[in-house]
Amino acid sequence: MKPRALSGLRSAFGGAGRVEWIGVRPGRRAALAGVASVRAAAGGTLEGDHARDGPRAITLIQHEHLAVIASLTGRVRVDPAILRRNVSVSGINLLALRDARFRLGGLLLEGTGPCAPCSRMEEDGVLGDGGFNAMRGHGGITARVVEGGTVSVGDPVIFIELVAVVAARGQRSLEL
């Protein structure tokens, strides 16, 4: 087997992922409400979510990491709503989408960076003592909406291209 270039490896996925859960929060520090479907406009955030528009408009977490976080905090399971991320996805390595464009249902997103945990993870009713460290490395990614549309639970998550490819075509400068 001939070795592939790193860029080729970074673009190879075994298949599509899946949207497992979607949540929006109506205000700062408000609890996330799970929704079956939601719209977002280009450059914006999910309708009904208080997050600011821009490069960190949507937050995503790896669904498979919920079991890891639960184990690290002594829980049986962790509800994605308490982790304050908008979307939980399974079946595709979310971290590999950090510097890529990808489809989330009808949305075209561009990964903009890691989504680090905040001190709220330590609060009672969230994860409690050790919650911050349990989330480290499992916090997911942030993304901006390049093309608006609708995303629903059960929709596919599909890699499109690396951000470096987009920049090479002159459509975006690398600011990451």
Image: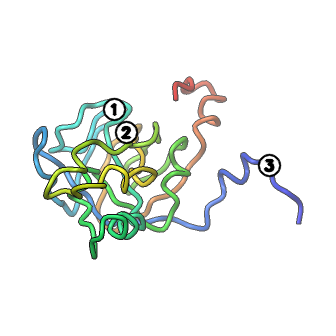
Please give left or right for residue 172 compared with residue 108 in the image: right
In the picture, the disc for residue 5 is 3
> Which amino acid type is shown beneath numbered disc 2?
Val
First in residue order: circle 3 vs circle 2: 3
Per the image, the residue denoted by label 1 is 43
Q: Tag 2, which secondary structure?
A: strand
Residue 19 versus residue 120 in the image, above or below: below
Per the image, the residue denoted by label 2 is 145
First in residue order: circle 3 vs circle 1: 3
Determine crowd level at label 2: few under 14, some 14-19, many 20+ residues with C-alpha closer than 10 A: many
First in residue order: circle 2 vs circle 1: 1
Determine crowd level at label 3: few under 14, some 14-19, many 20+ residues with C-alpha closer than 10 A: few
Q: Nearest to the eye among marks 3 and 1: give it.
A: 3
Residue 45 versus residue 126 in the image, above or below: above
Give the CA distance from mark 3 to mark 1.
33 Å
Q: Position of residue 100 (x, y in %)?
A: 54, 43
Q: Position of residue 163 (x, y in %)?
A: 57, 37
Please give left or right for residue 137 compared with residue 40 in the image: right
Q: Locate residue 77: give its quadrant.
A: bottom left
Q: Tag 1, which secondary structure?
A: loop
